[in-house]
Image: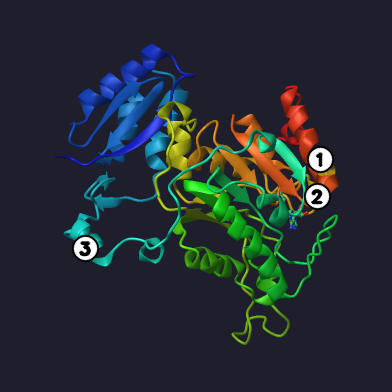
Amino acid sequence: MAEYRDEILNVSLYDNEECEQLKDAFNSAFPKTDAFMSIEDGSLTIHLCQLDMVKFREFLSTLGINDALKDVAFEIVNKIGSYGLRGSKRHFAGYNAERKVTNRKAKEQDRGKHYYANDNNFSKINNQLPFEYENKIICADSLELLKKLPDNCIDIIFTSPPYNFGLEYDTHNDTASWNAYYDMLFGIFKECIRVLKYGGRFVVNVQPLYSDYIPAHHIISNFFIENKMIWKGEILWEKNNYNCKMCSYGSWKSPASPYLKYTWEFVEVYCKGDLKKAGKTVDADISAEEFKSWVVAKWSIAPERHMKEFGHPAMFPENLVERVLKLFSFKNDVVLDPFNGAGTTTVVAKKTGRRYLGIDISQEYCDTAEKRISDSDCGQQTIFDIIE
Ligand SMILES: C[S@@+](CC[C@H](N)C(=O)[O-])C[C@H]1O[C@@H](n2cnc3c(N)ncnc32)[C@H](O)[C@@H]1O
């Protein structure tokens, strides 16, 4: 049986008949074992095993349909970066079959998966978040506030903690000794793990302090692993900000001490007890195209450029939160951000139909978070929406 790679095209904007014409003509012109098209719910799927791209281009050029539809159909195949070549055909599936591991399942069983987390003693009994904390922004030290919550009552945590870079926050001192900093951070993270449901996700955006050679993403991951959380994966958030410094003093064009440049941050994803999260299919709000694009774990998203307007020095953009929430949680889930800042996590939770609890130690930031939520409540555009 042929193995296919599926590429999904949203064709709801194109004429139905022309889409059908494209599908039927394609299915007659190419052998099904190479590729075929299908249409369902306004999406056209190209099931690809192998394809001669020159012939595909010629085929499209002779077809009497809208040029824009031809272009998108060609591009969705042409832009696939990973393929093998055999003769004049690109191979999209099974091209590296010869490199495949045999008896994969048995070998996995012999090795054991996520061995570091399997002897956890997390309770599987989940609880409701008490009503007084639902859809709330609370000004408090998260260490104190979280102690008031029952075990296992949060579906997903998404946060970016302060990184101890020396930023000028409203109240938080961002230049502690590293030991004091990690004591503070891990004290709060331990409470977060306790309140997370069995099967819940803990997603943390981390930026290492490269200039001081502090690999915060590794130190934080170590903490999660020691606390029996399962590493689900890591997203590389590509910010494309190429304005980092080129070298450290005395090392220009010399191996003495070149300074590596980074244009990205990390998003670490950990699970409590189980990789699979409970939830109803009707509450999954991610589209097929979003899913296909976002499971490729390199996300190119511009940094938040309007922190001044929101009066906060270290915000992440709404788009990052939207992807995390739609990919890792269901509608109506409870979202917690224990370092909520100007409230990006909570406003996106609200906009995407999730319940939320945002905690920040600064009253000023909490007021901003409340305002963003009430603006989105009235259907009013936030500064972010206007600028987008
Ligand atoms: C990197 S910022 C988060 C920004 C947020 N992601 C946004 O987009 O607005 C970290 C936040 O942690 C808050 N913070 C620091 N220590 C805290 C604590 N012990 N409890 C609660 N919040 C704290 C700071 O006030 C700051 O707003």
Q: Locate residue 156, reporting x and y percent.
A: 55, 45
> Mark 1 = which residue?
368
Q: What is the crowding at mark 1: few (fewer than 14 residues within 10 Å), some, or many (at least 20)? A: some
Q: What is the crowding at mark 2: few (fewer than 14 residues within 10 Å), some, or many (at least 20)? A: some
Q: Earlier in the sequence, mark 2 or mark 3?
A: 3
Instruction: Tell whether circle 2 marks a residue whose Cβ is less than 8 angstroms from ligand 1.
Output: yes
Report how far apart the C-alphas of labels 2 and 3 lie in the structure: 49 Å
The quarter of the picture where residue 5 lies is top left
Q: What is the crowding at mark 3: few (fewer than 14 residues within 10 Å), some, or many (at least 20)? A: few
The answer to whether mark 2 and mark 3 are in CB contact below 8 A is no
Q: Locate residue 137, reporting x and y percent.
A: 74, 40
Question: Callout 1: helix, strand or loop?
Answer: helix
> Mark 3 = which residue?
107
Q: Which residue is drawn at 79% across and 69% down?
A: 175
Q: Residue at x 39, y 20 (%)?
A: 41
In this view, 34 is above or below 189: above
The answer to whether mark 1 and mark 2 are in CB contact below 8 A is yes
Report how far apart the C-alphas of labels 1 and 2 lie in the structure: 9 Å
